[in-house]
Amino acid sequence: MFDIAVQPPTQARPGVILFPPVVARVHSDPYRYGELSQIWAVATLVYRNGEVASEQLGGQTADSAHPMPQSLWDNGNGNGSSSQGCGANRDQGYFYFPDLVIYQPGRYRIRISLMRMAYTSESPEGIACVEENVDSHSIVVEGSAPRHARPSTRERAILQILKNDGQNIPSPPS
């Protein structure tokens, strides 16, 4: 399973880095995706109808998988795994997009696509395959929007885990 752990703000200003920064995570049976080194995520800006908003999203739009730190994220029961018992989904890795910026006013979503390299005898160099997509909530971009949003308690905890893992977490824009 793949989801957005830290959502972008619901309102943003054109040309201003989104805060909080977007974080996606993959959590699944450890054998579903195999090696984390074979997966990465790509952020794309889409309109409400799903059409790609070309050239409107800037910043780091791709990230390779980062292994989940020892202090696994809490999926509801405090131990980093779902409450479904043995063999349940476990947080495997995360993807961090620290400086996304939307250039034009409008209503958008950020689509995060989980990518995997597939190797075959016909393509020994590998082919990139889209495994899953997940869309953020809607973002209204306009000049009068607040400069940043306050992350939820859970999102702040996730950002702290990333900071402890060595990621540079930006401050809210002033």
Image (tube, helix red, strand yellow):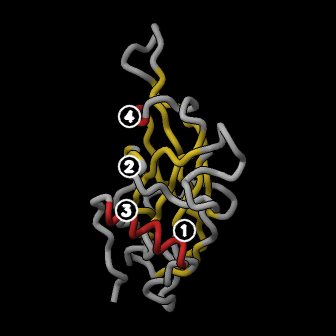
- Of all residues, the one furthest to the top in this rendering is 121
The residue to which callout 3 is attached is 162
Determine the CA span between mark 2 and mark 4: 11 Å
Q: At 43% from the left edge and 42% from the top edge, which residue is drawn?
A: 40
Residue 3: x and y in percent read 59, 54
In this view, 37 is above or below 58: above
Q: Amino acid at mark 4?
A: Ser
Determine the CA span between mark 4 and mark 1: 24 Å
The answer to whether the residues at label 4 and label 1 have Cβ atoms under 8 Å apart is no
The answer to whether the residues at label 3 and label 2 have Cβ atoms under 8 Å apart is no
Q: At 45% from the left edge and 84% from the top edge, which residue is drawn?
A: 148
The residue to which callout 4 is attached is 37
Marks 4 and 1, the one that precedes in the sequence: 1
The residue to which callout 2 is attached is 63
The answer to whether the residues at label 2 and label 1 have Cβ atoms under 8 Å apart is no
Determine the CA span between mark 3 and mark 4: 18 Å
Question: In what element is the residue under mark 1?
Answer: loop
In this view, 82 is above or below 147: above
Question: In what element is the residue under mark 2?
Answer: strand
Marks 2 and 4, the one that precedes in the sequence: 4
Marks 3 and 4, the one that precedes in the sequence: 4
The residue to which callout 1 is attached is 7
Q: Nearer the viewer, mark 4 or mark 1?
A: 4
Q: Amino acid at mark 2?
A: Asp
Residue 117: x and y in percent read 45, 28
